[in-house]
Amino acid sequence: MNTKELYEAAREIYSKYGVDTDAAIKKVAKIPISIHCWQGDDINGFENPDGALTGGIQVTGNYPGKARSIDELRADFDKAASLIPGTKRISLHAIYLDAGGEKVSREKIAPRHFDSWIDWAKERNYGIDYNPTCFSHPMSADGMTISHPDKNVRDFWIEHCIGSRKIAAYIGEKLGKTVITNFWMPDGYKDIPADRYGARLRMKESYDEIFREKIDEKFNKDSIESKVFGIGAESCTMGSGEFCLGYAAKNDKLLTLDTGHFHPTEVVSDKISSTLLFLKEILLHVSRPVRWDSDHVVIFDDELRAIACEILRGDFTERVHIGLDFFDGSINRIAAWTIGTRSMQKALLYAALEPSDTLKKYELDGNYTSRLALMEELKTLPFSAVWDMYCEIENVPVRSAWLEEVKKYEKEVLSKR
């Protein structure tokens, strides 16, 4: 049987559960996923490509073919995007500026340094998201930025973050698509601090200064990201979950939930409904933690499906912004992008094929037997046939055919770098 024949059989099966597979495909195709540019070059960026990666994060592996320039990174991203269905955005860090060979100090990065990215995104109808880069810099070498005891250091990073908001608003206005600007700070202590409150007060006051200027949310929305710990910040992280949730709720900001930034037994899928009771919107950074914030490539696992189900069950597609954040230098980087983003798309489609109204009714009626039974039956329905049709409709490779495309690109392009 070909893809269409398999799909027709699957559509009939799903219809018996009250699910319209055609509508599910159309719904998922419209949900944007923000794909992180930094998977393509191991978070090197173009400010100082040979500099060390610092800030409690690391990329492992040295697979050949890493992007070394903006042109190479864009070409690699284009290749990955051609293998991925659905609506796509690109997430940029400040260090991916296009300065034309000019050396630009971090706090002096300006909107004009992203004009070529705007032109590139316009041609492809991509949205852009933005991140100030508060790591891998001499002014963050001791692990502190906006909570630093030294006012000169704090002011440097405050200026960089204020500039980042202006860059994001500029991009949003030029593209006509709202930019989400994510603020993640590596600030923390390796050993037990004596004054957590003082450091967090400095961080709060710095954020207040960063966000002082009002920016039209039509062009830019601000989000702050928490973390449990980082390398070199094992004992205390200033931007904890409680700090960031409290700040976001009080100051009408988005909260970024990174799937690797919590304790190993916590899951972000359980946090979505709680945070949206108190926040208008949230941003997700979807990665795959293996015992810690290891940022493994996203796969189609239980937690990813649970995240997608929470988004669709609550009809939160306008309130939850989905971004990816993983980096693996041990495998082909284009394959990493493709596997991770297709997995996120699979999870959204899986969720869209769930008869959630029926499940909710069972729950309200106290019919937990039927709820559990149906949830289990859904796991073995012919989901793959619907996924294959989605890929065919989107004109991207069906099943594992994408891997041959990556291997060909590696042979013809990556191996020559």
Image: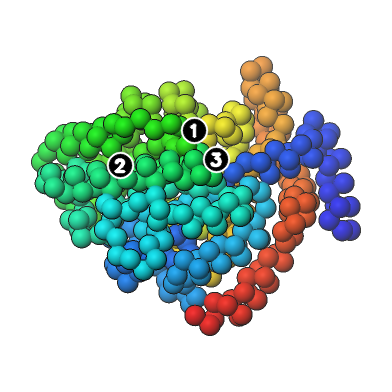
Q: Secondary structure at mark 2?
A: helix
Residue 180 relative to residue 391: left or right: left
Say whether residue 286 is visible: no
Distance of label 2 from label 1 (alpha carbons): 17 Å
Residue 28 relative to residue 5: left or right: left
Which of 229/159 is in front? 159
The residue under label 2 is which amino acid type? Ile
User: Quadrant of the image for the N terminus?
Assistant: bottom right
Which of 358/218 is in front? 218
Give how far across and how far down residue 118 sits, in percent. Answer: 51, 52
Which of 210/144 is in front? 210
Colour option used:
rainbow
Mark 2 nearby-residue class (10 Å; few <14, some 14–19, many ≥20): some
On screen, residue 390 above or below 61: above
Mark 1 nearby-residue class (10 Å; few <14, some 14–19, many ≥20): few
Residue beneath label 2, please? Answer: 162
Residue beneath label 1, please? Answer: 218
